[in-house]
Image: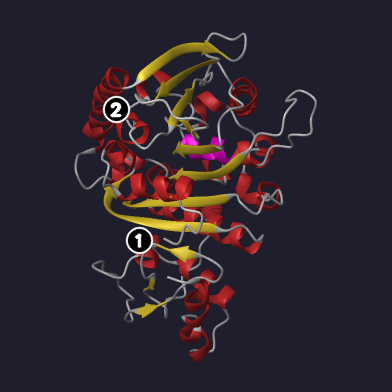
Amino acid sequence: MSRSSSYQERSWASAHGLSLSKVLHIAQSVDVSFVLYGSGGSGSCSSGVNRLYFPGSFVSQSHTVWNMECNMEYSWDKWSKEELEKQYSPSCWSHRFSSDVVIDAHIATIQKGTEQGRAYAQTMLDIPYGSGPCQLIDVYLPRSPCPNPPALIYIHGGYWQMLSKDLSGFMVPPLVDLGIVVVVPGYTTAPKGDLDQMVVEMRKAVAFVAKQYSQFSGIYLCGHSAGAHLVAMVLATDWTQPEYGIQPNIRGAMLVSGLYDLRPLLNTRVNDPLKLNMEAAVRNSPELFPDAIWDGQLGRRLVIAVGQHDPPEFRRQSLEFHQRLVKCGLPAVLIDVTNVDHFDVMDRLNLPDYELTQALKKLIYDEEFVW
């Protein structure tokens, strides 16, 4: 899809006397699963299907806005604690397993995948990028060396309190086959580490990779869930600060099923080990300062991806963050992945033909990157 055609598709909104901002406001007010999909779904106030492409962006498929006549008011700060807990519990929304099974299945899948990744690629494990016990990186190298390869730094998820780099090499085989060096940093999860510390650690890890491996043709970032949030915070770094000592050549990033506004988490169980207050939540919410992600590098491209069976709030946050990036002038792509939940949207990156594996390939190697 071309950029010009994405503008032409706005005619529906104009024909119905709606500004694009009004359409987005309505879209964010209804069930987000209706907002992003045009096949299936149901609703008590469904009024038909109409196409809408968002301006200044490329999307993976036609976006569809359902329930355009609904007048529901969206405001997470008025929700009950029970509703917030459900909206921010991805295991409750899986279409494959019950909530008490899906997390165990995810861990088993990425553990087995990481074992296979370590057996498949050349590895350099547990390289320290700092003095802390979790400040280590794993490096996965292509089996056939190539000069000036690109590097993909993957930041794991786990709601900032679970998982580790030792479970995060599952996507290695198809990527090293493409000549990509995969780097996986660890960080100090809660309750031992707080969110400010995690952000600093990931920034230092990226700076370390840029300094130690200057032969890379470019650095690309990828993160899932909490890792997508940390990628966004890395993208918003002021690299002129003396503690970094380098301006990393970050050429692009793919953020998968992330959270970019942490304020709704304050009154949930997720916050028990994090112990965020409002000030810390705002400070660590990249959706509130998207302009910091734009650094004037015309070659930097971003992919925001979300799964069909992610929680509605994860889907809303992905849509809203994408739109804010576009308004800042960033070339951001929104990819809506069908038939996946919050967990297998990432598990499938070990498959060469998977949509997001192909998106990473295009992000790194396709200069035009029309998705």
Nearest to the observer: residue 65 or residue 84: 65
Answer yes or no: do the residues labelled 1 and 2 have beta carbons within 8 Å? no
Residue carrying label 1 = 33
Q: Residue at x 65, y 51 (%)?
A: 290
**Label 1 secondary element:** helix
Q: Is residue 329 above or below residue 266?
A: below
Q: Residue at x 26, y 45 (%)?
A: 94
**Could you say which disc has been placed on residue 110 in the image?**
2
In the picture, the quarter occupied by the C terminus is: bottom left
Nearest to the observer: residue 43 or residue 210: 210
Residue 29 x/y as whole percent: 48, 66
In the picture, the quarter occupied by the N terminus is: bottom left
Nearest to the observer: residue 174 or residue 268: 174
Write the start and end of the magenta stretch as one range. Answer: 226-232
Q: Main secondary structure of the magenta part?
A: helix
Q: Is residue 115 above or below residue 78?
A: above
**Label 2 secondary element:** helix
Q: Is residue 364 left or right of residue 279?
A: left
Q: Is residue 337 above or below residue 16?
A: above
Q: Residue at x 63, y 28 (%)?
A: 203
Q: What is the three-letter code of the residue carrying label 1? A: Ser
Q: What is the three-letter code of the residue carrying label 2? A: Ile
Residue 324 x/y as whole percent: 60, 59
- Closer to the N terminus: mark 1 or mark 2? 1
Q: In this rendering, which labeled residue sits more in front, label 1 or label 2?
A: 2
Q: Is residue 362 left or right of residue 274?
A: left
